[in-house]
Amino acid sequence: MKLKKLMIALVLGVFAASSLAAGSMEGQQAPDFALKSSTGENLRLSEYRGDVVMINFWATWCGPCRQEMPHLDALYSRYQRVGFNLLGVNIDDDSGRAMDMIEDLGVNFPVLFDARKEVSKLYDVEAMPVTVIVDREGTVRYVHHGYKPGYENMYLDQIRSLLRE
């Protein structure tokens, strides 16, 4: 019985620590980065200052990422013209697989490649997907871990709110 309680306490402690790490990013300046994109050009987060930016960390082996991407692309298509940008950050070692996936899914938002996981470390990404929403001043306002159907409605509400600010 003591072992069971110890295991439960350990699991809860790990969960709380990971939630705290992600939550501590909210309200802080988003770490700047530059990565090569699917078009071959380097893109830098700070170049999007003045826009609301969603940074979505994903991988080809992540089922929820594949499920989420068409919804993210719809948000990007709908709100890009009014000051919203989306940067998909792929963490696969092989960018070719990522290129195949974005082509298969018909994704139009910029996809960046973080094969060395440097940007993922800056953002404390430990599981896929992770979605970070940054306001016009470059402050992290929301951090979401994982994806379940319906999360896109929450993203929509948050994006609209930040666009109105």
Image: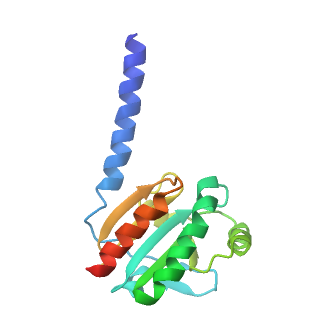
Q: In terms of depth relative to the viewer, which is nearer, 151 or 132?
A: 151
The correct choice, above or below, for 8 with respect to 118 in the image is: above
Q: Residue furthest top?
A: 1
Q: Position of residue 122 (x, y in %)?
A: 41, 64
Quarter holding the N terminus is: top left
Q: Which residue occupies the foreground of this view, 89 or 86? A: 86
Q: Does residue 122 show up?
A: no
Tell me which corner region of the image, top left, top right, bottom left or bottom right, holds residue 25.
Answer: bottom left
Q: Which residue is located at x 50 percent, y 75 percent?
A: 75
Rendered image quadrant of residue 131: bottom left
Q: Residue placed at 52% from the left, 57% from the top? A: 129
What is the image's colouring? Answer: rainbow
Q: Tell me the quarter of the picture where residue 27 sits.
A: bottom left
**Can you give x and y, in whole percent of width and height, for residue 58 in the image?**
57, 62
In the displayed structure, 99 sits above or below 25; it is: below
Whether residue 36 is visible, yes or no, is yes
Q: Is residue 51 left or right of residue 92?
A: left
Name which residue lies at 42% across and 69% down. 156
The quadrant of the picture occupied by the C terminus is: bottom left
Question: Height in image: 64 above or below 69?
Answer: above
Could you say where residue 68 lies in the image, as x and y percent from the top left?
A: 57, 62
